[in-house]
Image (cartoon, coloured by chain):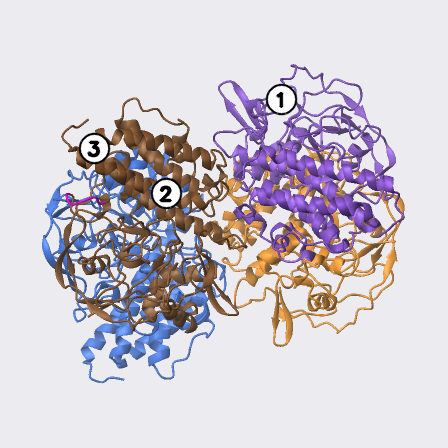
Chain colours: A purple, B brown, C blue, D orange
Amino acid sequence: MNASQTPSLHQQLVPQYESIRGLSKALAAQLSDADATVQSMPDASPAKWHLAHSSWFFETFVLRDHVEYYTLFDPRFAYLFNSYYEAEGARHARPMRGMLTRPSLDDVLAYRAHVDTAMVRAIPMLADEARALMSLGLHHEQQHQELMLTDMLHLFAQNPLFPAMFGAPNSMPALQPGPLRWIEGRNGIVEIGADAGHGFAFDCEGPRHRTLLHPHALANRPITNAEWISFIEDGGYTDARHWLSDGWAWVRAEGIEAPLYWQKGENGWTRFGHDGRQPVNPAAPVTHISLYEADAYASWAGARLPTEAEWESGALNISPTSGNQLDDATCPRPHACEQGEGLVQMFGDVWEWTGSAYRPYPGFVAAPGGVGEYNGKFMSGQFVLKGGSCATPRGHVRASYRNYFYPHQRWQFTGLRLAKDL
Amino acid sequence: MNASQTPSLHQQLVPQYESIRGLSKALAAQLSDADATVQSMPDASPAKWHLAHSSWFFETFVLRDHVEYYTLFDPRFAYLFNSYYEAEGARHARPMRGMLTRPSLDDVLAYRAHVDTAMVRAIPMLADEARALMSLGLHHEQQHQELMLTDMLHLFAQNPLFPAMFGAPNSMPALQPGPLRWIEGRNGIVEIGADAGHGFAFDCEGPRHRTLLHPHALANRPITNAEWISFIEDGGYTDARHWLSDGWAWVRAEGIEAPLYWQKGENGWTRFGHDGRQPVNPAAPVTHISLYEADAYASWAGARLPTEAEWESGALNISPTSGNQLDDATCPRPHACEQGEGLVQMFGDVWEWTGSAYRPYPGFVAAPGGVGEYNGKFMSGQFVLKGGSCATPRGHVRASYRNYFYPHQRWQFTGLRLAKDL
Amino acid sequence: MNASQTPSLHQQLVPQYESIRGLSKALAAQLSDADATVQSMPDASPAKWHLAHSSWFFETFVLRDHVEYYTLFDPRFAYLFNSYYEAEGARHARPMRGMLTRPSLDDVLAYRAHVDTAMVRAIPMLADEARALMSLGLHHEQQHQELMLTDMLHLFAQNPLFPAMFGAPNSMPALQPGPLRWIEGRNGIVEIGADAGHGFAFDCEGPRHRTLLHPHALANRPITNAEWISFIEDGGYTDARHWLSDGWAWVRAEGIEAPLYWQKGENGWTRFGHDGRQPVNPAAPVTHISLYEADAYASWAGARLPTEAEWESGALNISPTSGNQLDDATCPRPHACEQGEGLVQMFGDVWEWTGSAYRPYPGFVAAPGGVGEYNGKFMSGQFVLKGGSCATPRGHVRASYRNYFYPHQRWQFTGLRLAKDL
Amino acid sequence: MNASQTPSLHQQLVPQYESIRGLSKALAAQLSDADATVQSMPDASPAKWHLAHSSWFFETFVLRDHVEYYTLFDPRFAYLFNSYYEAEGARHARPMRGMLTRPSLDDVLAYRAHVDTAMVRAIPMLADEARALMSLGLHHEQQHQELMLTDMLHLFAQNPLFPAMFGAPNSMPALQPGPLRWIEGRNGIVEIGADAGHGFAFDCEGPRHRTLLHPHALANRPITNAEWISFIEDGGYTDARHWLSDGWAWVRAEGIEAPLYWQKGENGWTRFGHDGRQPVNPAAPVTHISLYEADAYASWAGARLPTEAEWESGALNISPTSGNQLDDATCPRPHACEQGEGLVQMFGDVWEWTGSAYRPYPGFVAAPGGVGEYNGKFMSGQFVLKGGSCATPRGHVRASYRNYFYPHQRWQFTGLRLAKDL
């Protein structure tokens, strides 16, 4: 144990821990045992699994490894709730997570309580390494909060009754986003990435390094649903010229004709969200689109996707805690596009696909040990997304944050902002 | 309504209805909402779905069609809980049954109560046609009781914690089955199949008709686990000569080395059942084997599978309600093989694979309307099984009963009895 | 060697051998090296493979095992050209047969010549067992002649240029088949199956045995293309009620709307055959249909498929060498339906699907050794077809002949004849 | 037609055209009609298809569009031999290329002759645009020469007889590569990419642009087979820690244990090449490895893959026509690693995987029209390879050349060179 930490810092950590852990529980409060158990596709996990796995992370990397006399809640849970840490041994196969009707949701909540009790007691005495792991665990927890929300949305979307997970929020004023404007970006050498000593960041966000920007501009706001409908109506999904070759194969094999969760009815397009099936709001940013769709739209519009460096450079002076993000257990959904000056809605609302492949930064080295598997091993085949969404817990995202998904995936709140060369 | 029925008959029907319907509910009493919701493979259905579908059958074919003023519990349930009746319109896709976390188990139990209330009130007044459909519905319910048990077993078998669905039954005495003996069967023309006027039978069991038996004998009892282990130890699963060509392809593609749910540990073979993981009982009939395995064993043993007609002819003078069958919500499992005279354990314990393809009897015509889809359309690619199992409700099976599965399927309590030509 | 055979019998065998072997070569005369090499689907084999495998059969079971001093043409060919005889050891995987660009067609023809030279020299001196194997080899050769024709047809059908394998035959008169008539069949106990001592038969055709026929009638002729078009136009392919459950799943998964090789153009239906793409002849028997389609048609027509025993009993007094069968290397195609008395076109034109699963006859025992794998191990999941087709070499088929295919397969010349209960 | 071109330039073009076109034909001279027809996997194409498609390119984009009175050889060939140009209309499905036994190899050679005659006559009169397309066609032809060689190798590797495509080259001296040395690379801003006005380059190689290099070093030579065997023997293929997550899934799903075409026998490792199955040469660069394997090796070795910019910057002063490349129709195979100064074997021998995703350069815009589909639409999911291989025609590759494959593909001559941060 390291006594050199000031009590005041430690005293802050406990409420932070409790606040973040509490949100996970609050988000699951609407779920039945069955809701929390079923896995709707291999990419998604059951809510129960998210709740247990995020607890397993603290139990394993903090309590088991750094806290004497800690007793595992159930030694079998390591097998059930390890996600992908090869160094932590064999584990339940990912596509089989939905088979675990036992332990029940109540059992998993008891597991959380057991871990939380031990954590709250241990936090004041954690040494630096363990405290860093705890901090990693809290950011990890926030990632799973967003995934739990989007995985539940995917599950509910499979139900012909279209159940709503949350009561509908207050109706929003019918805003009219202004025309898209181009904002010139920085040119020449800039620094991006996270600096090791300045607050928490995931390993893949660093090292902070210089990169060279070419003359370019970013759209002031994301593409809206109204603009997306124009793309559809102009035959965007049926004209191979706009599409990456892999994207075109995907569109044809899967019969893709609109964003995920959209349906066309007699009264126009509807979409499914945490508030159930609702009309598409033309003023809101389009969401639940794949990289392939984003790229095809940009091609159709005579533009391109921003690079990660362009996006991050553009976001440097914008507060990452601004915007429409997740604050509590209420319905997440993108807001209508704003009309402000400069770049708007960079943070929150929708993750913005970039044209950058998710690859390591110069000098990147994975952390040693189990947590070193956190990000580095996923650096093939995926694209970077920036800025967070309406389902990202406030405080979780920052300019250097690198989210990543495969180009066909679209069950997150994914959208796009155009860029162009100058 | 038909007033010609005597009250006494109708008065019998209500307790029969309540008894059968009550067993379904009792079997599900051990299940959590999550247990009852998850689907472990496309062949299986969630317990909740069984509970709802069997109620939908009464609601649709009896209450909706024959009872004035009946109000549907929820009009959307017809879409959710139709199994395969094309005439009843579009329906939820079978492999997606496990996505229905809503309605909950409680909702489904309320649905059952709604249907039961209406049925109990309606039964005394049902005309012949409706009463026949009610009777069909009760036998249908019993089929789903057995399927619910075997589907739950399959689900629990996917759980690395191996939960037991029922408390273990009293331990059984260590019986030693006697050596297998051959019982000569009837020869020449015999009558098999169900006669229309003599008690309930499914359409596919008739018409009763003459068939020609050739000289043959049946084994007096099923093959035991001890005998099956000899087959394994003699390389039965690795010698292509014993196997049907399709069976050999299946063994190799799936890596089959033993019956379903068996595992080999340091202390020998164990199997998974409703009482959890337990040692294999050498004296009990082997179960959870496919037709391919049954056929390979028979080939290895220098024998063959019985034909359906041979089996049915052999069973004619045996009480179909004898044997180890399902009486209440306790753990179903095969008993040790008996040592009695003649053919033993023909009914109960394990369904016995026959070598007969499931095809229509001479003169078979499917019933008109939706219920006509009951059996006839499944008459390709499947084999007949006879005699019922430990999970078959007592009173459900008879000599003419034709169960059928594809040759690779083995999640039912399936076993074998040898036959040979004389 | 067995000197007891009369020279005259042996003298007949050489020309018979040469005639049958010569037809295979003649059929392949139109094929380029590439034509003879490519495999168009796992169910089909390259022509070169058929030519080599049928030679390997003689080389292995006759020359290698029964002729002293015989030298294998190339010891590696046993690995390449064994089809499925597990007892003969490892072999090239079936779906990879089309990878064998070497040995070339010329090499394979040299292999044939090598085997033929040795066989012609050996035949006069073969003992009974070897002579029986030679006879089996000749019937085996004929089976592969038909398969080679239908496999080549499938390959050519994948080519957008629709090449014709043979010059078109003389145009046929525009016959008008009469209306379908019902011919009452035998009733009671009949004998079917092949008698061991009466000429060649495959093992699965016996033992000859008694079977019981129920009152029934057979259609006097096969269903025609004109009748099939009526089925299509009546929505036959889109109405689930007509279909076996497996058949309906197949129709929907594969998008089946017509027999294999049919296309609908501006001038009506065309079909692809060995003479290229041609208009569908309304008077000819429908062909290239699956069991599922045949069964659906029968259901739509208020009839059923004949059982094997009904068909065989009906064919007893008809010459099996009559009809439109393969005599030489000219274009095989079904002829217009005839108007004769009684049952017409039982042999030749199209294989007729029966409703009987391919299962062993009472008392069937597979032959010992490698050739014992000839038929018995395929007795699951397949249906029996009777009567031969326009691509069956004349002399190959007989009333007891049991052809068998899976219910979805239709690249053979498969058709149907209706039956009904009386 | 444009008369402003000097005759001398045009006179050079004809022999250049004939030389490049002639090499394709020479490479195919060893192939039978069957060899040239079969497709061994969807990624590969038949040799005949390569020969025809490269001719179609000239016929379509030069002769049809720019030469009056040119008559198409066969109008149906556009459908058969278009590869992926959506703008050129419907085309034969890629995985079905191997079904085209007709047209024959001879027909395709006649097609080539027809196109060549017209091209040689037209070249002196081509205007700038058409001449640029012809030049594109020649580089395109060279790409297909390499693909034809590697596709044939893949086909022959499926043949259990392991045929050699070429006679074995002279045996090489048993060189001993020196220990791997690190060569420091340039630092700071460098220019990479192809400049539009300086000789031929594919569209994706430009625009030339500035990029920022970080301190790094490259290995002086590729990794050898001997070093790769050390990786194998150290458990490289069985330790998840070295692998990208996608790579680890690929290794396990495919059962990967060594480079493609390697087999372990009693006398050690052998590999299959155009000279048949031969012992692995420990001194030669390892080849036929995927990006996943290359990345895992680098991780195991404590290094990383070079970025494209690092590699290209390192190659700037090295002659791209040096090295072991394809000059004529003889056996291509990597030579033993050299011991020279500085970076050796940058060009030729093996394509070197970089860690850079294949994405557009700043300012990249696809060319208008059909040829615009040349490269841009493939910019997702693939990685860049640099430097050419022993199967790359000499003169085809340059420092800016961007080859690209998916990370699991390895049937090209792919290898790796390590890099590290300084």
Task: Assess whether residue B198 is covered by the magenta stretch.
Answer: yes
Q: Amino acid at mark 2?
A: Ser
Q: Position of residue D168 (x, y in %)?
A: 64, 69
Marker disc for residue B129? 3
Q: Quadrant of residue D86?
A: top right
**Residue for badge 2:** B24
Q: Main secondary structure of the magenta part?
A: loop
Residue D66 in sight here = no
Q: Is residue A22 left or right of residue C109?
A: right
Task: Give the answer, above or below, for where B124 lies relative to A94.
Answer: above
Specify the segment rendered in magenta: B197-201
Q: Quadrant of the N terminus of chain B?
A: top left
Q: What is the crowding at mark 1: few (fewer than 14 residues within 10 Å), some, or many (at least 20)?
A: few
**Residue for badge 1:** A169
Q: Is residue D334 left or right of residue B68?
A: right
Element carrying mark 1: loop
Chain letter for mark 3 = B
Task: Give the answer, above or below, for where C126 lies relative to C316.
Answer: below
Element carrying mark 2: helix
**Residue depicted at x 63% and y 76%:** D267
Chain letter for mark 1 = A
Task: Assess whether residue B401 is covered by the magenta stretch.
Answer: no
Which callout, 2 or 1, points to the residue nearer the camera? 2
Q: Nearer the viewer, residue C320 or B371?
A: B371
